[in-house]
Amino acid sequence: MNNTKENTTPLVDNSYYEAVTTAIRSEARRVMESGEVSAVIGYKSGRRKGSAQPVIISDVSRIDELVFAPTCTNNLSLYLTKAKKEVSKKGKIAIVAKGCDLKALAGLMSESQLKRENLHLIGISCAGVHGSNVKPSEALSAATIARKCRECTVHVPEGVDCIAGTLPQLEQLSALESAELERLEAMSPAGRWAFWKEQFSRCIRCMACRQVCPFCYCEQCLCDRNRPQGVETTPRPAGNMGWHIVRAMHLAGRCAGCAECERSCPMDIPLNLLNRKMANELKELYGQEAGMQPQEKGPLATYKEDDDESFIK
Amino acid sequence: MPNTITEQNLRALIDTLVKDGSRVVGPKAAGDMTLYEPLAGGTELVLGVLPRRSAKETFFPLCEDILSYQKMEGKMTVEDIDLSRLPSTVLIGALPCDAAAPGILDAVFSWDYQDEFYLERRKKTTIIGLACTKSDDACFCTAVGYSPAESRGSDIFLLPLEGGRYRCQIISDKGNLLVERYKSFFTDEEGGNALPLSQPSMEKLDLQKIREWLENNFESDFWKEIAERCVGCGACAFICPACHCFDINDEGSEGKGVRRKHWDACGFSKFTNHASGHNPRDVQPQRYRNRIMHKFKYYDDKFGQTLCTGCGRCVRACPVGIDIAAVLQEIMKYEL
């Protein structure tokens, strides 16, 4: 979210991006040339100044297209899920991953969707990326940085095959998202209901939140079913609320916090607040938290004899 | 001959139109963004911002009821929607890229089937277009044959002048009728100099050449390369002024329910999913190809116009940075 009241002074120097870009290219070239991987999933520049987009490179002559910039927002792990069947998953693939993306990769490994040995992980020492609605040419600043990045705990990824760049000294930024979450938690249930009703009333059901989510890889989404219809598919209050509750519940204990759903929403619905709330609940109830390493199955997909069943009446 | 209107009078005109029972739709603040929404009064009109969604929903709403049904004592009754209840509407402050769109869509909505919902709204709406003074690097109207001063599609077209005035150009009979009826809000003065308009920087595209290339490259590898990154959401189509595909769903119960028409998008995997389970557009490149083909070839073949006014909304909204203008530039580079 672009907070115009914030400072627009660049948070990091351009030389940082140049160094990360050089490191990505050199590692990608090395593993492609040696035949270790068949393709590299990374970012390349777009037409608009400063813009970047995902790219899948399987030809070594194109390695120099790879870049890193504040617009490298995408969680590329999406391209390794079965939802993206256009992307060949044959052989080992190299993928560029920020700390938050790595958490998604680890989650996908935990869910037996990916195997670590089939991946070459190029981790990024990441200073943060743009939030939504920021002009691509703008520098990374307190005004343009994504809300999730203001509270990032995974600037430097762990358990990767190489780390691109060195993290510059970062300024401490106020935790806007936590503050907003606290504000909502302090509301009465009726107040919260009114808040979300208002937010979801803007939903146009473009499904961008689902399509960019690495964990929304179901081949048949419940919310697309029409024989019989599970959730109303029309952009109206009942269906919108239904869809967003289904989304939040299905991601509880799975969401890695990349906040791509929120960034991609053309109607600016603050979806990551729901994700964070569910993550907090899971942490409190089961001590489970998304991390950079694959874990056992998530708590909502596991049964233990000593599980608390007091809620069953 | 009424020539100009002050901003103050423009806002007062909205107040009067609302008072007279018209639905007035224009750019309005909706939280942190701007949307084309019904205005309660002139002060709500936001000038100089491109709304997040296009103005197409004035004629083709996101979702609308098209009939209702009810089963009583074993007998089913179906009730049509009373179209005469649709209000007379003034769409005000529509930017050229939005004002031009309904004129393009008329052809398909009145082709083999007369879409009475769209056509009734069209008939009852007067469009007051506004020249564009603020663009960004996603805008490319001039590249696809439109411009910040394009009055095509408007019934009245406003050109911003120095000193908070607008020069009014009456484009159609509908526009003339409105100006005649509300003459007192307009003045005969010439007004000052025109304010500088936006200048989108992209070079003009050769749409004819693009169409020819599309004609011969249905099976090109190009689609795979471009669309591999497409995630298959409907953001681009939903916020586009010219995309007009819709789905129809019956919602309710066996005893009572409503048939609804709502926006659909060719990027969705289920868009072409047959009842049999077979999907002729099985992978994303085939769906993205359809997006480009429909906009720059099929519609042109059939109706002589392309389905893009260069507003740049899809460029800004695409979660994976697909830039339709860059895709077209890429096609331009290919040999025919």
Image (tube, grey):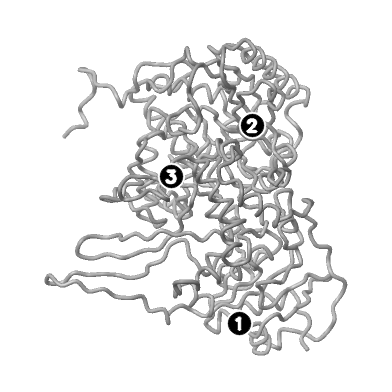
Which amino acid type is marked by label 3? Ser
Measured as percent of width and height from the top left, residue B229 is found at 56, 36
Q: Are marks 1 and 3 on the same chain?
A: yes
Is residue A289 left or right of B161 when viewed as pictured? left
Is residue A309 left or right of B92 when viewed as pictured? left
Which disc number belongs to residue A21?
A: none
Determine which quarter of the picture holds residue A81. top left
| A267 in relation to B197, above or below | above
Which amino acid type is marked by label 1? Thr
Look at mark 2 in the image and give the residue it sits on: A72
Within 10 Å of the Cα at label 2, are there few (<14), some (14-19), or many (20+) other Cα atoms?
many
Q: Residue at x 26, y 69 (%)?
A: B69
| B91 in relation to A170, above or below | below
Chain bearing mark 1: B
Which disc number belongs to residue B16?
A: 1
Measured as percent of width and height from the top left, residue A153 is found at 56, 22
Q: Residue at x 63, y 35 (%)?
A: A53
Closer to the eye: label 2 or 3: 3
Chain bearing mark 2: A
Which disc number belongs to residue B269?
A: 3
| B28 in relation to A78, above or below | below
